[in-house]
Amino acid sequence: MTTSRPLTSRDPERIGGHHLLGRLGEGGQGVVYLAEDESGARVALKVLHDRGGSRDTFLKEISAARKVASFCTAEILHVDEDEDLPYVVTEFIDGPSLRELVEEKGPQSGPALYRLAIGTATALAAIHQAGIVHRDFKPGNVLVGPDGPRVIDFGVARSMDATVTAASTVIGTPSYMAPEQLAGEVVGPAADVFAWGATIAYAANGRPPYGQDTIPAVMNRIITGKPDLGGLAGPLRELVTQALHKDAAKRPHSRDILLRLLEHSQGPISAPEALAQGRALAMADDDSLADERTARWATVKLPTATTPAKRPMFQRAALVTGVLAALVLLAGTMAIAVTGDSREPRRTAAASPTTPGTTPRQTSQHHLTPTQQTPAGAPSTDVPATPSAVATDVQAAVARRGTATFSVEGGMTQSADSFKAQGRLHYQPGRSTNYDLTLSTDLEAASYDGSAGPRIILLGECGYYRDDPTSCHPTDAESQREINDAFIWTASEVRWVTSPYNIGELLQKSTSLRHNSDAGTITYRGTAVGADLAADGPISPFYQMFGGGLTKVTYTLVINRAHLPERLDIDLWSKITPDLTYHSLYSATYRDWGSSGTITRPY
């Protein structure tokens, strides 16, 4: 059953007469909401980000997508614009995405894998038969419904005519993008075939064949490396290998993939008949598929080792290298024009040193100093409106209370660098914010198998594991370059995102700020220039991770009448090409200001 996440403070309540119920997902191209139409029927509604092209072109593409047989896709119900943002309303498929299915139940094999392979191949053949190139075929866009796999998300699809007459823009998800797609060349059906091969490899192994760590690393592997097909065996491995050929002209057509999976060898077969046979098998149950054909096509060799495979060493420098910097590095093999500073960003600790006996580092002109305000706990009737006034009031209120509990989640888009954390923080003006937190991260998901991750204490420039309280893991700039520890790195990210210093930096460097208020809270919505946040300040290492393509940062800050933060939502806009912007989202909540206790070193 499909579950949605709550709407954030950035989300509208209604779009084009549709009541939004929650978020189903978000990618580089847009946000997908669970919504209700005026009759109360549930639908999926996608709002597109920063889409280039005219309204006429957009409507033409959607019109072409409507020609695809509805049995293998989510039927497009309505297309319109709301405040100049195009949106698409589609049939709601009540089932997990292939990505969610694999994350929850692990790699697929046997009838389940064959059903996925033939169901998605049938859908792709139907899409191409309708004259459409999907351009973002991936596990997240395959829904496993009660009647078999469905391919969704035509918000970035193009008609084949468009791909013939002009080079496509770079659109899609890097782990599943073909080499020609990364290079900004003409993108045709062969790019979808490449994505199909990568998707089936993911379903069989639980990981993309070219990795999912950082965008630059994935791009480099797709262009120069070989795919990791893991335990995929037999004819399906051979077919996936052919689909992943770097030369688009040497990949099989989607119709040929379908016919091979059907094992059709008895003369010509019409396109409708082939699609009908593929659809029937995609809808079949496990018992019906438990035959020799399925065994031939869906055998996956399991690892024979009794201990988990050794993880590749976690490379800190690779993680923080900016997207645009890596594109410069790959410029000899990709036709993507980039600009900006390609140097590896200089990293510093999340705030100034706190080692006993040392003098705290002086803050920059953007750092905030406490000012005398009303007595602690006394709510203010004033609503500060300018960025500096808000920053001053918030900083003073936080300095008086000092401690809070928090929860946070977020991550760098198209990357495994994502996390969830909760715990306590202790803010001390002019010094590092100390933390006692428990976290989980996709960078080390295999280490805790979905259970709670480690508890970590951050004091100054040291990180301590709660179960190893005597070992200081340095978090200063130079030491952190060499640390092979994803958890300590992620704890530093949590501190950068949630620290009151970050709230101060966002406010002080805002180029615009709007607010509205009610009886209990004030909500601010601001915009800051990415380069300004990355240039200096205690949180600059965090913003430097996103490279020269970080064009702007938008945020929503909710404070109470005592000027204490209750919620912070951050949206980082990374422009990859003139037509492609990725959004990295982080959301933090704060509670119990002044009552959570100080944080000390564990013993």
Image: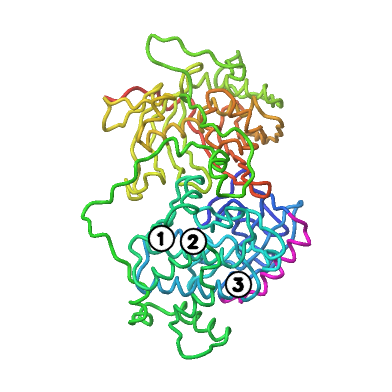
Going 63% across and 31% down the picture, which residue do you hit? 531
Mark 1 nearby-residue class (10 Å; few <14, some 14–19, many ≥20): some
Q: Which residue is mark 3?
A: 127
Asked if labels 1 and 2 touch by Cβ distance under 8 angstroms, the answer is yes
For residue 444, the mark is none
| Mark earlier in primary sequence (1, 3) | 1
* Residues in magenta, as a range: 53-71
In the figure, 310 relative to 136: above or below? Answer: above
User: Which mark, residue 139?
Assistant: 2
Question: Residue 112 placed where, x, y %?
Answer: 39, 71
**From the viewer's perspective, is residue 495 above or below residue 324?**
above
Residue 554 visible in rendering: no
Q: Nearer the viewer, residue 189 or 132?
A: 189
* Main secondary structure of the magenta stretch: helix
Residue pointed to by mark 1: 102
Alpha carbon distance from label 3 to label 2: 17 Å
